[in-house]
Image: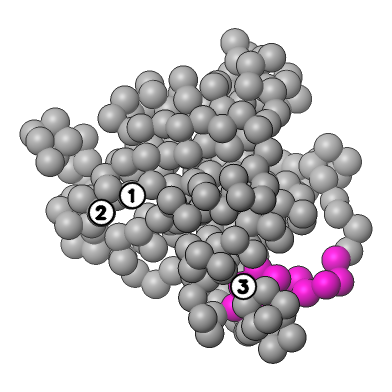
Amino acid sequence: MDDEQLLRYSRQIMLPEIGFEGQQKLLQSRVLIIGLGGLGSPAAMYLAAAGVGELVLVDFDQVDLSNLQRQIIHNSDSIGLPKVESARHTLANINPECKIHCINQQLDGEALSEQVAQADLVIDASDNFATRFALNEVCVATQTPLVSGAAIRMEGQVSVFTGAPGDPCYRCLYGDTIEVEQTCSENGVLAPVVGIIGSIQATEAIKVLTGAGTPLKGKLLILDALHMQWRSLKLSVDPACPVCQG
């Protein structure tokens, strides 16, 4: 680590839970971020600023005016651009040392497996169950830590799934019975709520990558922003889970 890096990350290095060794781990880490919307925006920005060495950005959408209320990685000049390119520009301004890889398409099958296998950790900032289930399945197969977040209206939730044998996975939480999928475009969302959840995802990612503190492993943290109340639920392995117990 050179003098400029020591200065850039000095406030983080001062933390005994992070220190010099933890910062080195971040600099050597590669994180895959699925979705550059309301959750992926703050998560990517904080991870780049914190010194994660490589970020792989995945999104196949373009920036729309309706995105700007909450997707803070984009701005008015980005309208019409691929979200990954808009995000790349913002992240380069935050920390030019961070290597950014852009994938402007939906990942599935072997392509998804390949990217997950190369990552030290995955941020699930997607907005649909199909993507979340597919991502969870690959993370379990490769034993790659997965930081999952979701937000709608004035509510949000975060959890960490290690992918390790004996720990619950995302499928254990939802099983085969899924309620009708709800979207922000149909139900609305308060802008800071996705910012809070995405920031917690970044925090949990840093904790997992550096070994600091106690991640939300086996726990679901739930936010009710309307009344500003937090709840934490313990997650258990579903013995009938077809992903981690199959």
**For mark 1, what is the residue?**
29
Q: Of 135 and 6, which appears nearest the observer?
A: 135
Query: What residue span does the magenta drawing correspond to?
Result: 168-178
Residue, x 51% and y 30% (percent of image)?
A: 102
The circle on residue 169 is 3
Residue 200 spot, x, y in % from top left: 50, 54
Q: Is residue 39 visible?
A: no
Q: Residues within 10 Å of mark 1 (few under 14, many from 20)?
A: some
Q: Residue furthest top?
A: 77
CA separation, marks 3 and 2?
25 Å
Along the viewing direction, whichever of 156 and 149 lies nearer the viewer: 149
Q: Could you tell me which quadrant the N terminus lies in?
A: top left
Above or below residue 19? Residue 44 is above
Residue ID for mark 2: 25
Q: Please tell me which residue is depicted at 53% across the width and 59% down the height of the picture.
A: 147
Residue 148 sits inside the magenta stretch: no
User: Which quadrant, please, contains the C terminus?
Assistant: bottom right
Q: Position of residue 82 (x, y in %)?
A: 63, 22
Residue 180 image offset from top left, x and y in percent? 91, 58
Q: Amino acid at mark 2?
A: Lys
State how the image is colored.
one colour
